[in-house]
Amino acid sequence: MEIVAHSAPGFRRNPTYSITVKRFTGTVVVFFADAVIASTTHAKVLREQGHEPVYYIPFEDIYFEFLRPSETRTYCPFKGHASYWNVIASGDAARDVMWSYQDPYSEMAVIDKHAAFYPSKVRIDVTPASRM
């Protein structure tokens, strides 16, 4: 088996570790202090073993006018390096409410140019599409 140059070291060390990313059929809206800071019908839901599902929203559906880059950086051996953003809206502010893997490992390329939000810092309304 050939290892891709930009492949995740986490998967090389633990090939049975499970992370799946699928398109979410429905609407995801993110609120902070009663302001909508993201809204999409193109979210992806990432399911990682041992963690709650995380909704990743395309950059084009995030209202970056409410967000400022943070100094915070983290690393995941399965996804890569994450950057964070602070939020300011409706006279309120919070640190590190959103993160993104802007150059993810090849196995997680589907979340490139997408970001996720901490449900403990914002309100995330998830509405599945109705099935007829």
Image (cartoon, grey):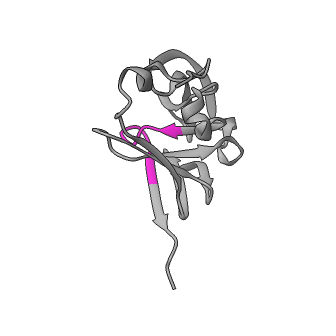
Eyeballing the image, is 118 above or below 126?
above
Q: Is residue 25 left or right of residue 65?
A: left
- At 45% from the left and 26% from the top, the residue drawn is 78
List x then y, in percent, for residue 120: 36, 39
Q: Which residues are magenta?
A: 116-124
Query: Of residues 121 and 47, which is closer to you in this image?
Result: 47
Q: Is residue 52 magenta?
A: no
List x then y, in percent, for residue 79: 50, 27
Query: Of residues 74 and 70, which is closer to you in this image?
Result: 74
- At 43% from the left and 49% from the top, the residue drawn is 123
The answer to which image quadrant residue 115 occupies is: top right
Query: Of residues 131 and 16, which is closer to you in this image?
Result: 16
- At 39% from the left and 43% from the top, the residue drawn is 119
List x then y, in percent, for residue 36: 58, 50
Eyeballing the image, is 103 above or below 34?
above
Name the residue at the bottom extreme.
132
Name the residue at the front extreme.
1
Query: Of residues 43 and 119, which is closer to you in this image?
Result: 43
Q: Is residue 57 left or right of residue 9?
A: right
Eyeballing the image, is 67 above or below 23?
above
- At 54% from the left and 36% from the top, the residue drawn is 91
The answer to which image quadrant residue 84 occupies is: top right
The answer to which image quadrant residue 60 occupies is: top right
* Res. 57 visible in picture: yes
Q: Is residue 120 magenta?
A: yes
